Structures are given as structure tokens and as C-alpha cells.
Amino acid sequence: MKSYALIFPGLGYGSDRPLLYYSRKIAEKQGYNPIIISYPDLPRGDRNDSAWLEDCILRGRVKADGQLLSCLDELKKSDRILCIGKSIGTAISAAWCTNHNIKASYVMLTPLEQTFSYPVESALVLRGTSDPWFTAGKLPVRPWSGNYTEHLFKDANHSLETGNVAVDIEYLGLAIEKVSSYIAAIAARG
């Protein structure tokens, strides 16, 4: 049975950018077959406009349907599904999996607050304390009923960057280390 890593990029943060690129490489080394979702025509807007964000999440989910419905039966039979999302991709992945009753584990790189409205059983959450897309301190202690681990990066923005290149490189290494440990733990559970 195959294992799949579904890669859900962010707006302006494609699958070739470091957080997603290295996360995908780690998943591949653990035996996951990557499927990169794209939704290049999502409209730009104001992060404070909840209607715009909800519209983008819905449009992204429709785009994911167009790319994943042909393999939906195989995904449902898979023993392991890993969703690796960045920003709006975290909400799109959780919405898509919820809509199709897909049980997945999640790597959530700088998630949007809307992501936490979807049921998730297992997630690694990485976000910055200075992320303007996510109100610092607003995350409930247990937003989901399942297992999740959150790691905060001090003074980091929505790309987990601080403006100090040395710190940014350190944060990238730490983030990828967290992703690697999480994916290895999933593999160990079988």
C-alpha cells in the first residue's frame, strides 16, 4: 500500500520554497509519494478580510478536488496520508480532507487561524510569534481533540523569517528538524 504526502503551498509561497521543498524531501525519504497541489489563480486580498480568506479556501479546495479526485479511492485505501501545508494551504488541506473523510497527519507551516476550525487528529504546527496572519497568543491550548505539537519561532514572521539572515537559517534548520522528527514518529507508529 502506498503512502502519500499531499503538498499544499501558500499564496506566494510555492512548493519550491525552502520550508515546503525540504519537508517534501524528508517525506520522500520516509517512503511517501508526493503530490503537489497547485492553485495559482487564487485572488490576492487583505488578510483581515475573512470573507476573502474563506473564498480562497473554498476555491483552493475545488482546485484540490480537480487534482486529487482521480486518485481519491487510492488515497482512501492508503495506510498513510501526510498533508504538508503552508499558510492558506494548511486550511485548504484540512478542509479538503474533512470534506472527503480522509484521515491524515499534518505538517502545518505558519497556519491561518481558519485552519483550526477543521477537525484534525495529528499535527505539527510551526509558526512565528510575529506572524501578522496569525494573532499571537490566540491559539487555544487544545484547538483540536487529537494530538498536536506546536513550536513557536521568536520574532519570526509568516515565512518564519526575522530579517536576520543568520537567525533565519537557524530557524529553517530547526523547522526542518522538527518536521523530520514528526514524520519519523509517524512512520514508527506504523
Image (cartoon, rainbow, N blue to C red):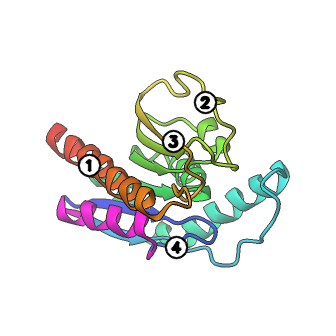
Q: Give the range drawn in magenta.
A: 16-32
Residue at screen point 77% across, 70% down: 44
Q: Mark 2 points at which residue?
A: 139
How busy is the neighbourhood of tag 2: few (under 14 within 10 Å), some, or many (20 plus)?
few
For the C terminus, which image quadrant? top left
Q: Which of marks 3 and 1 is nearer the N terminus?
A: 3
At label 3, the amino acid type is Lys
Q: In this view, does 176 lie to the left or right of 84?
A: left
Q: Name the residue under label 3.
A: 154
Q: Name the residue under label 1.
A: 183
Q: Which of marks 2 and 1 is nearer the N terminus?
A: 2
* 162 or 58: nearer the viewer: 162
Where is residue 92 drawn, in percent x and y?
Answer: 59, 55
Q: Which of marks 3 and 4 is nearer the N terminus?
A: 4
Q: Nearer the viewer, mark 2 or mark 1?
A: 2
Report how far apart the C-alphas of labels 3 and 4 lie in the structure: 24 Å
How busy is the neighbourhood of tag 4: few (under 14 within 10 Å), some, or many (20 plus)?
many
